[in-house]
Image (cartoon, rainbow, N blue to C red):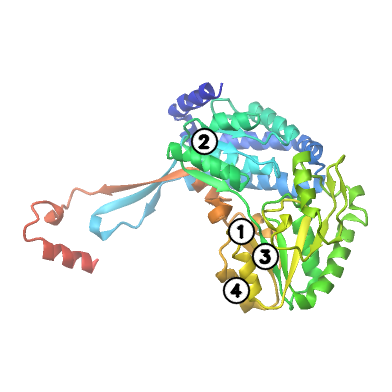
Amino acid sequence: MIPELLQSQKSYFKTEETKNVAFRKKSLKQLKAELVNQDSKIIEALAKDFNKPAFETVLTETSVVLSELDHMIKNLEKWSKPKWVLPSLINFPSTDILYSEPYGQTLIIAPWNYPYQLAMAPLIAAIAAGNTAILKPSELTPHTSALLKQIISNVFKPEHVTVVEGGVDVSTTLLKQRWDYIFFTGSVNVGKIVAKAAAENLTPVTLELGGKNPCIIDQTANIKLTAKRIVWGKFLNAGQTCIAPDYILIHDSVKASFYKAIKIEIENAYSKNPENSKDFCRIVNTKNFKRLTKMLENENCIIGGEVNEKSLYISPTVIDEPNRDSEVMKDEIFGPILPVISFKDKTKIETIITSYNKPLSLYIFTTKTNDAKKLIEKFSFGGGCINDTVVHFANHRLPFGGVGNSGIGAYHGKLSFDTFSHKKPVVKKANWLDISLRYAPYNGKLKKIKRFLKWL
C-alpha cells in the first residue's frame, strides 16, 4: 500500500492546504495537545522497550519534543514570510525576495536509541515547513512505534501525515519510492544505503549518523567533575547515544586519579550494583547485546564488565588501555563500555583521532583555554563541548549534525524549519529603467562591461 499512500499524499499536497501557515500552526497545536495527553503512555512505552527511566525520558525525549513544538509554533509565521534581501547593483533597479516553500512529500526514518524524540523532532519541522510526511519508526522499539502510529492517526489525516511500521523490507520499499526529501537518523552503513537510494532520484537528504567520539582529558582537568560529567554523558541511555563519548584519551599523570573518581561517580549514579538501579537502561535487543559483549572479550575491565543476557544488562564498564586493533576500538561502541587510552605526548592524540573518520562529537576537559581552542580548530567534527559532554545538543540555536562519515546536514530550531524548506530566490525588476549594456550586439561593449564589473 506504500505507493498508493504516497500518491494520496502527492494529491493532497497539490490542494495547497499544507502551504497555509494558519493550517500548519493549527496542526502543530493539535499535535502538542495530543502529546501532552499521551505523556504517561510515552514514558511507559520507552520503559517497556528498554527499561528507560522516566527521568531520562522526560529529559531527553518528551521535553525536547515539546520545546521544539513550542519554538515552531511561536516563530512559524515569522519564518514563513518572504524575506527581502539586499539587491545587487547589477540588477538595478530591482527588489530581491527569498521565499520558503515546502519540498513536498518527505520521508523520515527514525532510529531506536531515542525512538520518540528522534522521530518527532524532524516530523514537527516537516509539518511546520508545509510538507506531507511518512514516518518510519524503528521496529526495534515496538511499543514506542505503535504509540507513535496511534498518536499521529489521532491528529492527522493519512494523506497529510502517517506512520508506516515494519522492518527492513518496509524500509526498502519506502526507499524505492520517489521522495522530495529524506531525513534519516541511524548508522553509517544504513545511511549509505539511504544516500544511494536517494541519489537515484536526486532527492536531497539529511543524514544524522555517528562515529567514534573522542574525549580528551589533560593534566589540568578537574578530575572529580570531569568523571561526574563523563559518567552522565556516557552511561545515559546505557551508552546508546550517538553523541556519547566513545573513548577517552587521558594524560598519563592523571589516569589513576580518574579511575578512582569515575568508580565513585558510577556508584553515586547507579549504586554498587547498577543491575538493580532503576536509573540504568538496558540494551535494546539480543543482537546488540551480543555485539557489545564481544567487545569485552580479553579486555582489562577495571570497572564493571558484568553482563546478564536474560535481562540484556551490561554494567557501566571501563576498559584500561585496549589494543588499537581490538573490537572495542574498531567502530562506534554504542553501549555502556568506555575504553581509556593514556598519552604523554600530545602527538598521540592526533594520531589516534585522525585514524578514524570524522566523529559526530568531540569533548575536551582542560583548564587551558588556548589548548582547548587549538584542539577545537585542529580536528573536524560535528559538534562538541569543552568541560562537559552531550549538552551541546540542548541548545536549539546551535545546529546539530555531523560532517563526513558522521552525517550530512543539520537541524534544530529554525534550522529544522530551513532543512525542510526550499529557499526560492526571486528578483523583481522595475520597468522604469533598462540599461542596454547587457544586450547583444556586444560590439564595442567589452571595455565598458569590464569597467562596470570592476566598479561593482
Local SS, label 1: loop
Residue 109 in percent (x, y) is at: 60, 38
Residue 242 in percent (x, y) is at: 67, 52
> Upstream in the sequence, badge 4 or badge 1?
1
Where is mark 1, residue-wise? 359
Q: CA distance from mark 4 to mark 2?
A: 39 Å
Any part of residue 285 in sight = no
Name the residue located 65 percent from the left edge and 29 percent from the top edge. Answer: 165
Q: Nearer the viewer, mark 4 or mark 1?
A: 1
Please tell me whether residue 362 is drawn above or below residue 160 in the rendered image: below
Where is mark 3, residue-wise? 363
Residue 204 in percent (x, y) is at: 46, 43
Q: How would you rate the neighbour count of disc 1 (Cα within 10 Å): few for under 14, some for 14-19, many for 20 or more?
A: many
- Determine contact: label 4, label 3, CB under 8 Å: no
Q: Amino acid at mark 2?
A: Thr
Local SS, label 4: helix
Q: CA distance from mark 4 to mark 1?
A: 18 Å
Any part of residue 225 in sight = yes
Left or right: 101 in relation to 72:
left
Local SS, label 2: strand
> Upstream in the sequence, badge 4 or badge 2?
2
- Determine contact: label 2, label 1, CB under 8 Å: no
Residue 106, numbered label: 2
Residue 373, numbered label: 4
Name the residue located 44 percent from the left edge and 26 percent from the top edge. Answer: 15
Q: Amino acid at mark 3?
A: Tyr
Residue 346 in percent (x, y) is at: 65, 76
Q: On the rendered image, what quadrant is the C terminus found in?
A: bottom left
Q: Nearer the viewer, mark 3 or mark 1?
A: 1
